[in-house]
Image: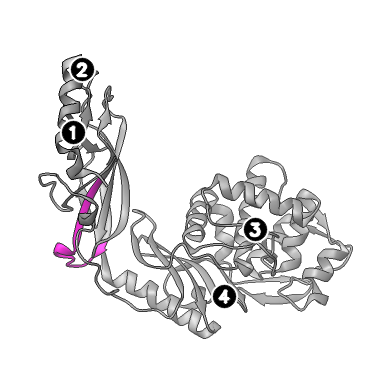
Amino acid sequence: MFRIAILSALAAATVLVFPASSVTAQEAAPPAVETAADEVLLVDGETGTILFQKNPAQPFPPASLAKIMTMEIVFAALRSGEISLETTFPVSEHAWRTGGAPSGTSTMFAALNSQVPVADLIRGTIVQAANDAAIILAEGMEGSEAAFAARMNERAAELGLTNSRFANPTGLPAEDQQVTVTDLVRLARHLRATYPELYAIYAEPSFEWNKIFQRNRNPLLSAGIGADGLGTGFTEASGYALLGVTEQDGRVTFLAMSGLESERERAAEATKLLRWASETFEQVPLFAAGATIGTADVFGGTAGWVPVVAQTPVTALLPVEAGDRVRARIRYEGPLIAPVAEGAPVATLDVLVDGAPVLSQPLVAGAGSASGSFADRALGAARELAFGWVRAF
């Protein structure tokens, strides 16, 4: 059975367990900020706290944001030594026609049958959102767009991008291609943390190739809010999208959004949300490492319950003067079955603001409970029959 305990997020009060109808700490309040975007996820980079969300699991076509997954494949290949920045790849007729000068799409204007170094293809893909650059990389590494897309999907699964599927390296319209803002933020956090030197290219303001100068298409870079990535996208079906990252006064914020009606609205809404996040939230330590958060029932053990503790400090970015809008809850599959080892993961702590979870962190057993005698197990069974219905759902 799945158990939930509700407690104050600012002090570990006595843990009470409630049925399903009592799971929400309080009724959800109206959002503190409004946005015209259809899908949004705004996340604090250090703690992982969700600052704002709107339809975070709703899929939409990625458009050029698919190139961010393409770059993850390329960055990983560079790190493993599969390719180098000096490796050159040829410009095929397919790459030239589909993503180059004849295509009428975003392009770095790579010349047909020329050889382009990986370092320049990366800048073409990132700074210019160039479709020819992405296709040249895909064909050079895997032989075809289809084979490269298969690699993208395999890697996306490894990274936990559970609701994303890719059909090509460019994001050009294709069936069965989608992302979510949740997956995009996960991908951005991974890219920034794993490949910091290559990630820095996302902040470069311009790139010139074949004597054609183009500026970075990310509108946040010139907004004066500390932006250092990542990219934009547009499709007729889902409108204008953006995946952005800012760092101000040491605080990193990730924003993914889609469903805007114009480039101007996309830039304005993104800037508004990021400034709101910077001005409205403060970092709050909730529990120290090793602090006992509550208890979890144990069946058939020498002890009928074990304390659950935070293995690492629990810190969240919360609205200034949030007060009693903040709650926490403990979730676990229970009762736990003995033996339970000290330090074993047994539960999850959710921090909630206005009834909505904004941060989750695993909890471990603060003490063990060995397998008990027959009498212990019989007593546990009797307790479960007598009281389990109160906690089950």
Other residues around mark 3 within 10 Å, as few (<14) / some (14–19) / many (≥20): many
Q: Amino acid at mark 3?
A: Phe
Q: Which residue is mark 2?
A: 372
Q: Is residue 156 visible?
A: yes
Q: Is residue 310 magenta?
A: no
Foreground of the two, 111 or 373? 373
Please report the residue visible at 74 percent of the width from the left and 63 percent of the height from the top. Answer: 133
Please report the residue visible at 63 percent of the width from the left and 65 percent of the height from the top. Answer: 126
Q: Are marks 2 and 1 in contact (CB under 8 Å)?
A: no
Mark 1 vs mark 3, CA separation in Å: 50 Å
Q: Are marks 4 and 3 in contact (CB under 8 Å)?
A: no
Left or right? Give the position of 295 relative to 248: left
Q: Amino acid at mark 1?
A: Leu
Q: Which residue is mark 4?
A: 238
Other residues around mark 4 within 10 Å, as few (<14) / some (14–19) / many (≥20): some
Q: Are marks 3 and 2 in contact (CB under 8 Å)?
A: no
Q: Which badge, 2 or 1, comes first in the chain's sequence? A: 2
Residue 120 picture location, percent across and down? 72, 61
Mark 4 vs mark 2, CA separation in Å: 58 Å
Q: Is residue 327 magenta?
A: yes
SS for callout 2 = loop
Q: Which badge, 4 or 3, comes first in the chain's sequence? A: 3
Foreground of the two, 281 or 199? 281
Q: Which residue is mark 3?
A: 166
Q: Which residues are magenta?
A: 318-330
Q: Which residue is mark 1?
A: 385
Q: Which badge, 4 or 1, comes first in the chain's sequence? A: 4
Mark 3 or mark 2, which is nearer to you?
2
Mark 4 or mark 2, which is nearer to you?
2
Mark 2 vs mark 1, CA separation in Å: 18 Å
